[in-house]
Image (cartoon, rainbow, N blue to C red):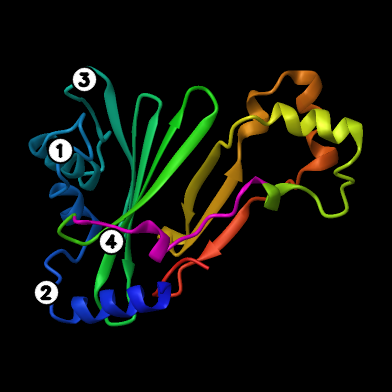
Amino acid sequence: MKKINIFVFLICCCFCTVKAQSIASVFNSIPDKILLPLDSIQRLDIVDLYNAGRAARIVNNLGDTSRLISLNENYLALTTGNLQLEMALLPMINDSKIICVIKTVCAPVCDSRVSFYTTDWKLMDSSVFFNPVEKNWFILDGVDRNDEYFKTFEEALDMDLMQFGFENDGFSLIQIYTTPQYLSPDIRGKSDKYLKNEPKKYTWNKIRYE
């Protein structure tokens, strides 16, 4: 069914005109409900500041400072308080493009949400393009899950916090299991014994992240 959904999406895109060719243009057209702190004028201003080589920061509508920390043709990163927004313009196999947005909130442990949109900001089914692993992927192979110490450690992992981020301008995506960061120091100290140290990495293949 997933392959059928992807095929239908690609066929539909063949009849669509890609109006936005750069991440700056899709950022400027982003609906306010997706990026509440910055209105359209502020988005234009912060991009102009960045392109002029000046400090790209402005006071937004919530009274916080928004900073544009990275911008090129296909990738953008913006921070506002404890929120980080990353956007990548991803090419599809039929020469159309889609937008991937990562919103990360750190309070203080970071947790992210990944969304996909058309270039005119219609929300799409994320599972068509990306299926992140669950916490069991981060547990080391060979761990005795019947061990009482491991059971105590696993019981403390009572929520799934995941941080996502782009690498290589969005063509790579990483996933970090951040739940252990909120544990007490004595329990967190056991994480190296049970959990992998490296993030899960995905690569964009012009159809989905694999």
- The spot of residue 107 in percent (x, y) is 48, 23
Sequence-wise first label, 1 or 2? 2
Q: Which residues are magenta?
A: 122-135
Q: Is residue 40 left or right of residue 117?
A: left
Examine the rendered structure and indicate whether residue 139 appears above or below residue 153.
below
Sequence-wise first label, 3 or 4? 3
Q: Residue at x 47, y 66 (%)?
A: 209
Examine the rendered structure and indicate whether residue 111 appears above or below residue 4.
above
Label disc, if present, on residue 32 of the rendered structure: 1
Q: Mark 1 is on which residue type?
A: Asp
Q: Rounded to the nearest whole Å, what is the CA distance between mark 3 and mark 2?
A: 35 Å
Q: Residue lying farthest left?
A: 41
Secondary element at tag 1 = loop
Label disc, if present, on residue 17 of the rendered structure: 2
Marks 4 & 2, CB-CB < 8 Å contact: no
Secondary element at tag 3 = loop
Q: Report the front residue among 129 and 74.
A: 129
Q: Report the front residue among 9 and 184.
A: 9
Q: Rounded to the nearest whole Å, what is the CA distance between mark 4 and mark 2?
A: 19 Å
Residue neighbourhood size for the residue with mark 4, other residues' Cα within 10 Å, grouped as few (<14), some (14–19), many (≥20):
few
Asked whether 179 falls inside the magenta stretch, the response is no
Q: Which residue is mark 4?
A: 73
Q: Mark 4 is on which residue type?
A: Glu
Q: Which residue is mark 3?
A: 62
Secondary element at tag 4 = loop
Q: Report the front residue among 51 and 179.
A: 179
Examine the rendered structure and indicate whether residue 174 appears above or below residue 84.
below
